[in-house]
């Protein structure tokens, strides 16, 4: 009897702590971009046990009879928390989820939107199928617990690499822009011409160190250059606060400057640690998560440039 009681008690506490975790997720900062677009900005830190992996920016676009969501968080719990926030902003059903790239912090919350069709680049879909389970393992390791309800759900409608597709969804004009490569091999940005708003995913991040882990720097910098040709008023980046076109130009310069500095070192035959000593990282050091990301970033850039120079 006592034994059953203690099992019952531990089940109760496990259930209670799950509920506490889901309730204790940091709240997004909600910014109204215009009458039909809201940005839900996540924390700027790396994933931790405290934030439970909540770090992504998401976007809600309210259309004629339904709504569109861009990026859904790292776990089913974050997706559910976002769904609750969206419900406070619109009573229209969420009909579409767009994933800007395959990384777990942007896609593993898809499961919280079971009635939505998922859209992404073709490469994003492939990479999510391949690496989704690894991303789930990463966040389970950081959070220190399992997320049994989180599943890898991928797009049913996809767009090819190096394409721009104009379409109207729920009465909203959109251009799906899939560059050759950038932050990953499968980024997709969403340009809203009537709103002059660009939803960039992690092709742009603001006040945060970008991650180069799956990037192609050369094409990324070219994509940032092309963004300067858009008549954009507001950019919702993948992480960090909203950006202006000037902020995007500053990111482009920072990335191009780093690339050129490393390329010059490679040309001189220096090692990556010698190059690191020579680089001027003043502007980079102002960004969040510099210490956690920048060493690996320089190494990644070095390897790409070295491979390209053969
Ligand atoms: Zn991200």
Image (spheres, rainbow, N blue to C red):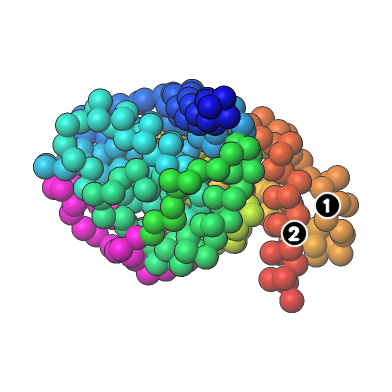
Q: Which residue is mark 2?
A: 302
Disc 2, ligand 1: is the CB inside 8 Å?
Answer: no
| Sequence-first disc among 1 and 2 | 1
Q: Position of residue 71 (x, y in %)?
A: 39, 45
At 40% from the left and 67% from the top, the residue drawn is: 122
276 with respect to 45 (left or right): right
Q: Which mark is residue 287?
A: none
Please name whichever residue, 250 or 37, is drawn nearer the observer in this view of the structure. Answer: 37
Question: Which secondary structure, mark 2?
Answer: helix
Q: Are marks 1 and 2 in contact (CB under 8 Å)?
A: yes
288 in the magenta segment: no
Q: Is residue 49 shown above or below 93? A: above
Q: Position of residue 7 (x, y in %)?
A: 54, 31
Of all residues, the one furthest to the front in this rendering is 1
Please name whichever residue, 88 or 171, is drawn nearer the observer in this view of the structure. Answer: 88
- Please tell me whether the stretch drawn in magenta is mainly helix, strand or loop: strand
At 34% from the left and 66% from the top, the residue drawn is: 159
Of all residues, the one furthest to the left in this rendering is 65
Q: Which residue is mark 1?
A: 275
Q: Is residue 280 shown above or below 25? A: below
Q: Is residue 145 shown above or below 303? A: above
Q: Which residues are magenta?
A: 155-180
Please name whichever residue, 198 or 117, is drawn nearer the observer in this view of the structure. Answer: 117
Q: Position of residue 229 (x, y in %)?
A: 39, 51
Question: Which secondary structure, mark 1?
Answer: helix
Distance of label 1 from label 2 (alpha carbons): 9 Å
Q: Position of residue 231 (x, y in %)?
A: 33, 44
At 33% from the left and 51% from the top, the residue drawn is: 98
């Amino acid at each position: 009897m006592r034994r059953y009681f203690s099992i019952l008690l531990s089940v109760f506490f496990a259930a209670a702590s799950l509920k506490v975790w889901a309730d204790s997720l940091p709240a997004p900062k909600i910014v109204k971009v215009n009458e039909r677009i809201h940005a839900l900005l996540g924390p700027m830190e790396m994933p931790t046990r405290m934030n439970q992996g909540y770090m992504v920016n998401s976007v809600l676009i309210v259309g004629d009879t339904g709504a569109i969501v861009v990026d859904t968080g790292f776990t089913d719990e974050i997706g559910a928390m976002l769904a609750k926030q969206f419900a406070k902003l619109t009573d229209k059903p969420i009909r579409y989820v767009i994933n800007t790239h395959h990384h777990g912090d942007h896609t593993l919350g898809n499961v919280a939107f079971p009635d939505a069709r998922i859209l992404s680049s073709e490469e994003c879909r492939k990479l999510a199928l391949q690496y989704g389970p690894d991303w789930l393992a990463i966040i389970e390791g950081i959070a220190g617990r399992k997320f049994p309800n989180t599943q890898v759900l991928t797009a049913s409608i996809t767009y090819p690499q190096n394409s721009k597709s104009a379409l109207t969804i729920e009465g909203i004009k959109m251009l799906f822009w899939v560059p050759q490569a950038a932050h990953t091999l499968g980024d997709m940005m969403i340009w809203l011409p009537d709103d002059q708003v660009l939803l960039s995913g992690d092709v742009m991040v603001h006040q945060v160190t970008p991650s180069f882990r799956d990037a192609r720097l050369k094409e990324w910098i070219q994509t940032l250059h092309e963004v300067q040709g858009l008549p954009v008023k507001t950019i919702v980046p993948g992480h960090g606060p909203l950006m202006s076109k000037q902020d995007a130009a500053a990111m482009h310069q920072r990335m191009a400057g780093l690339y050129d500095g490393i390329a010059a070192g490679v040309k001189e035959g220096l090692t990556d640690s010698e190059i690191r000593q020579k680089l001027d990282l003043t502007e980079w050091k102002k960004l969040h998560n510099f210490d956690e990301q920048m060493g690996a970033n320089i190494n990644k850039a070095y390897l790409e440039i070295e491979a390209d120079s053969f």
